[in-house]
Image (cartoon, helix red, strand yellow):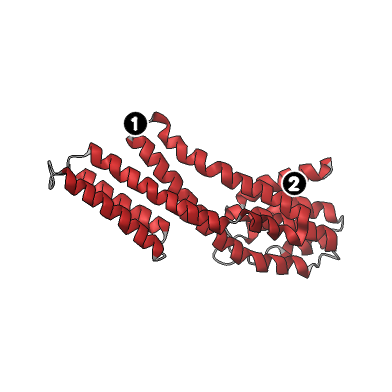
Amino acid sequence: MDQETGRRMINVFFRSFCIQSTWNFWRMQNLGFAFAMIPSIRTLSTDRDVRSRMLVRHLQMFNTNPYMSGPIIGSAMRLEEALCSNGNNPEVDQLKAALMAPYAAIGDSFFWGSLRPLAAAVGVLLALKGFFIAFLVPILIFNPFHLWVRLKGLVEGYRRGKEGIEFIRSMNLPGMARQLRWVSVVLLAALALVVSSQTEWPFVQGLDILKRVFLLAVILACLWALKKGVSAVTIFYSVSFLLFLVIGLR
């Protein structure tokens, strides 16, 4: 990758953060995607009409998880460079249509359904233990990984073109999501233990055995819900509500 291409990739990378800034019900993330593609389109032709046709093509409907948009943008850039002809490139449109839904499902399950609840649980647990910087911990857990997927996905998508999907497949995000859900359950159990140790329960005062039975029931209920396919996000918020209810009864 030469210096000029590197500068263009950096420009596209920062523009990709705006992919949801003009989200709309008509074509969803289309304006953000087209905005990110402009630096690449400018280098492909000096003909204003050709540029216009290319830009209009990228204004078609597009919607995926924002953190997974980088690999698609990178692959689209490569295909535009390799196959551009008078602004028409059906392979790019087919690639976007084929990848946006699977990438949305993978990204939503991993980032929203697994990594975010885990980061939140760690932050709450540290806050209950009195750590002053606990509010920063979820940010430090969540942001580095999604930034890496954005940047590395963009670079690998551009380098591999249509084979950029291999980068996403190699990370095995669905498998990682399942593992993170189990870790989240363990953290929820730890969170319940901390709340129990710091809280006087008005309806079981002095009966520590009931507290332990309650905590065991919470853990088993979480494991059973995961086995039944209940979302980790649903479990997290349900248990959090229960814990805050217990705290409120002090």
Q: Going 87% across and 55% down the picture, which residue do you hit? A: 46
Q: Amino acid at mark 1?
A: Gly
The C terminus, quarter of image: top left
For residue 145, which numbered disc appears in the image? Answer: none
Question: At numbered mark 1, what does the secondary structure look like: helix, strand or loop?
Answer: loop
Q: Is residue 122 left or right of residue 17?
A: left
Q: Amino acid at mark 2?
A: Met
Q: Nearer the viewer, residue 226 or 142?
A: 226
Earlier in the chain: of badge 1 and badge 2, it is 2
x, y percent for residue 11: 72, 44
| Dots 1, 2 in contact, CB < 8 A | no
Front disc: 1 or 2: 1
Question: At numbered mark 2, what does the secondary structure look like: helix, strand or loop?
Answer: helix
In this rendering, the count of numbered labels is 2
For residue 130, which numbered disc appears in the image? Answer: 1
Q: CA distance from mark 1 to mark 2?
A: 43 Å
Q: Residues within 10 Å of mark 1 (few under 14, many from 20)?
A: few
x, y percent for residue 10: 72, 43
Q: Is residue 29 visible?
A: yes
Q: Going 33% across and 47% down the picture, which residue do you hit? A: 189
Q: Quadrant of residue 90?
A: bottom right
Q: Is residue 148 left or right of residue 237?
A: right
